[in-house]
Image (tube, helix red, strand yellow):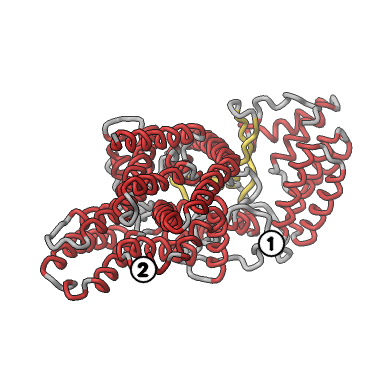
Amino acid sequence: MKKYLIVSTILIFVSIFVDLCLEIEFVQDDTFIFLRFAKNFVNGNGLVFNVGENVEGYSSLLWVLLLSGFLFFKLDAILLSQISSMIFGVAVFVVTYFLAFELNTRQKKSHRYFFSLLPLLFITFSGGFHYWSISGMETTLFVFLFMLSVLIFIKNIDNERSDYKLSLLLFLSLITRFETLLLFGLIQLFYLIYKRGNFFSKKHLKELAVFVIPALVFFTIRYFYYGNLLPNTMHAKTGFSFHYFIRGFEYFVDNLKYNLLFGFVLLLPLLFLKKIIKEKRLLFVFSVAFIFIFVVTLFGGDVLPHHRFYLPVLPLCFIVFSISLGYLFDKNKTISVTVIIISIAGSIFSYQKEFKELFGNKSFEDGLVKKMSIYASFVNDEMKVQNKKLTTALSTIGAFSFYSKGDVIDIIGLTDSYISHNPIEVKEIDDSFPIAWRERHYNVDYVLERKPDFVLFPAGAKPTAYPEAALFSKDEFQKKYYVQLIYSRELNQYLPIFTRREKPLEIREGSSSPLFVKHYIQANNYFLSFLSNRDLNLISQIEVQTDSMMIFNENSKSYAYSILGYTYYHLGKYDYAIDFLEKSIEEDPQNCNSLLYLTKCYFVAEEKEKYLFYLRILKKYSPQSLPNIFANIGSQN
């Protein structure tokens, strides 16, 4: 009877989990990076991102191989990546219960069942776990293998017979994510401390060999194929400096707030530390959780949302916390029941509070994937017209790279070993910049030397990451690139894409400061706010920011006048708009935003000769902007 009750309870938690996952169903843009590697692999081009460039720009070999299998059999790899993520998420529930039950040895049997099921409830209402379980990423596969490895180690810690399951699991975990080496090291350290006499026994050495030999083969192949022992993504995303520690600390605090009941999940076990220390298996789980969290924090956490890097040990934290609640129950049942009820309520409340962010990020990723697929179609069409392979540089490479048939330069360096190993920051571009993306590895001079045909920013013509701001700040970039506009009927909006000029723009030498980019971003932000709420007080803020742009960099005048021009256009002051827009064109005849708005202004003014004149220029530099050009002409939106 108890068995059916336990299974039913687990199924209830799993059902809630799946339902919550489906509420935020989406595909993470990074999933498409795996899919591009898989597509090249299946097509016989090797495990590469760009054909001919051997760079390990993925974080999980096992996940690439799984997706390759889907593509090889011509299945829907995108949908199956999501389904696989959820299946492994469900598997984590099962492993978590068995691990909790294995560690709950001090409670009465009925209490043991309850305190073994309790961690599943906390996982059920973990927003980050839902988010990454539906994303199509390898996260839940790694959490499953990580947790299963811990379970097998715990069960066999006193086993005198050789058991190679743990070694094989650890190897599968290693080729899923590199962090497995931390778990492997902690297992060996624990073995050395508690069974030092058997560390060099024949049994243990055999078990080590089953992991170490395949691991050495794996690292050897990686080194000769990619030229590095570590994944390129580690070099590009992490670092060991004060900046990364601060970023990691912020990441940790955010995790406390959303997943760990403001730190109570970590603090309660400390009150029972003496009991935990006496239980060597529980001490191991406790140590793995705390050390893993410390290392992730030390190296800067993750640039992606919802605490992905902490998820492998999140179930361990909930298990130790639940066992500590059991210890509290043995001491004082009333207090314990109160704390349990408050903890459950707090977990549900935290999820409800986080759901808005989860849904917001889901909507962003949906929009990003759709937008990048449209950009990719544009580049593919351009390759047909020009009859050559084209190169695009951007920071959000996932969906674009999967749908594009051209080469891609990742300006963050995830799939570019030169950038990841030779980052050069622009010193003026610092934390004061109003940007959202936190990556600090970039080398924009190298990107410009590669002469990409197109450059893409996910926010259009506005930088939202340090590498984008650094690239935009370069005189070389302003000389060689202009903004072309693509009208998307599907999205009913213009999509800007920086396009290489046929002839470089003449600019003022020696008058440039990267600080103009900060004011350019802020001017755009104020303009977008004005469009949404029509606050006339924002007009003066836009003017202040555009003036600052021109003070820091005279070469930014075309952008500054353009922003002022379409601000006044949306105010309905067409004469002012025309004045600024024509000044913008004098500075840069290929400023397509200004050309677009000038065409609209003269259309409203019924000056046929002038609007046809600017329309012809716009057609030359930005032919994809012409569809729907006169829709909503003269409106204030």
- Residue closer to the observer: 324 or 230: 324
x and y, in percent, of residue 95 in the image: 31, 46
Q: Which residue is identified by label 2?
A: 277
Where 123 sits versus 197, above or below? above
Say which residue appears at 79% left-offset and 47% top-offset.
561
Quarter placement of the N terminus: top left
Say which residue appears at 87% left-offset and 41% top-offset.
536
Question: Could you tell me the amino acid type at mark 2?
Answer: Ile
User: In this orientation, does residue 571 appear?
Assistant: yes
Query: Disc number at residue 432?
Result: 1
Where 76 sits versus 584, above or below? above
- Residue closer to the observer: 533 or 250: 250
Q: Secondary structure at mark 2?
A: helix
x and y, in percent, of residue 270 in the image: 46, 65
Q: Is residue 106 left or right of residue 578?
A: left
Q: Is residue 155 left or right of residue 90?
A: left
- Residue closer to the observer: 30 or 379: 30
Where 207 sits versus 67, above or below? below
As measured in the structure, the alpha-carbon distance from the residue carrying label 2 to the one carrying label 1 is 45 Å
x and y, in percent, of residue 636 in the image: 80, 30
Q: Secondary structure at mark 1?
A: loop
Callout 1 environment at 10 Å: few (<14), some (14 to 19), or many (20+)?
few
Question: Could you tell me the amino acid type at mark 1?
Answer: Ser
Q: Is residue 539 left or right of residue 475?
A: right
Say which residue appears at 46% left-offset and 51% top-offset.
308
